[in-house]
Image: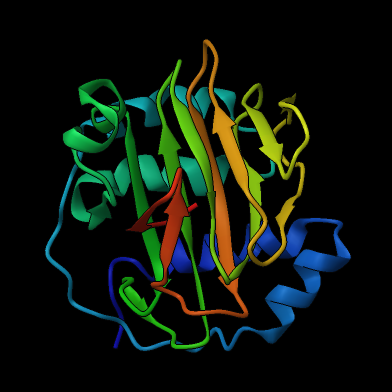
Amino acid sequence: MTTKFDELLQQFHAYLASLDSALVADAVGRIDWEMAARDLEPRPLGCLRHLDRAVELAPPAAKPLVRLLARQRNDLRWGQTYTEADFGKAFIDNYGWLEVFGTRGHFANEDVAAGLLILGPDIVYPDHHHVAEEIYIPLTGGTEWRMGEGGFGKREAGEIVHHASNVNHAMRTGAEPLLALYIWRGGPLAQKSTITGAATQGRG
């Protein structure tokens, strides 16, 4: 079945395939890209306003994907794990994720989940961990990332950020928003992440 999101999946695949990373190449090579489409109701979120800035910030290799995402933003089903009661209104107004494929995404895949995360400026995504291994590729630069017991360090667009199973990690944005591509594999794809002692289903 042909869908209006086929090009999004193709651009997602093409960007991943362009990266010079053995870890990403292994992940991409293990994915069966012939996936069945799901008919999902759109769910736009407030954080989508940051996509226009993400288009400006994205490196050349990622621009086709980010431009297409920005054009289709209101037709896609965006998710939020948390509520205002968890981290406050500022977080919720500046946070959301899109599962392109996985157990809940626009394309069905029971083995791996992948999509995109948005965080607006001046947002902290607190320490959390999960069984699934996670690969992040920021498509905008300047966000600070922390893993394990280490401190925060800035990552630039196109860098590979690898979170092994059950390793704590956190992110905090500065003056610019974060748009990041993620891949979850090797664990339950909708498993609850443990955040500051509270079990919460999530992406990240």
Say which of 171 and 69 sits in front: 171
Q: Is residue 36 above or below residue 173?
A: below
Which residue corresponds to the image point at 20% horizontal and 24% vertical from the top-left? 89
Instruction: Name which quarter of the figure residue 142 lies in.
Output: top right
Q: Is residue 112 above or below residue 23?
A: below
Say which of 155 and 70 sits in front: 155
Residue 11 horizontal/vertical position (percent): 54, 60
50 relative to 178 in the view: left or right = left
Which residue corresponds to the image point at 51% horizontal and 31% vertical from the top-left? 178
Q: Is residue 132 above or below residue 199?
A: below
Scheme of colours in the image: rainbow
Say which of 176 and 173 sits in front: 173
Which residue corresponds to the image point at 44% horizontal and 88% vertical from the top-left? 110
Residue 150 horizontal/vertical position (percent): 78, 34
Q: Please identify the residue farthest to the top as the structure is shown.
A: 175
Residue 76 horizontal/vertical position (percent): 24, 56
Q: Please identify the residue farthest to the left as the structure is shown.
A: 41
Instruction: Name which quarter of the figure residue 102 lies in.
Output: bottom left
Say which of 67 and 202 sits in front: 202
Instruction: Name which quarter of the figure residue 35 lies in.
Output: bottom left
Residue 203 horizontal/vertical position (percent): 43, 56
Q: Please identify the residue farthest to the front as the structure is shown.
A: 197
Specify the quadrant that holds the N terminus. bottom left
161 relative to 129 in the view: left or right = right
Q: Is residue 36 above or below residue 166?
A: below
Q: How many marks?
A: 0
Which residue corresponds to the image point at 86% horizontal and 56% vertical from the top-left? 20
144 relative to 7 in the view: left or right = right
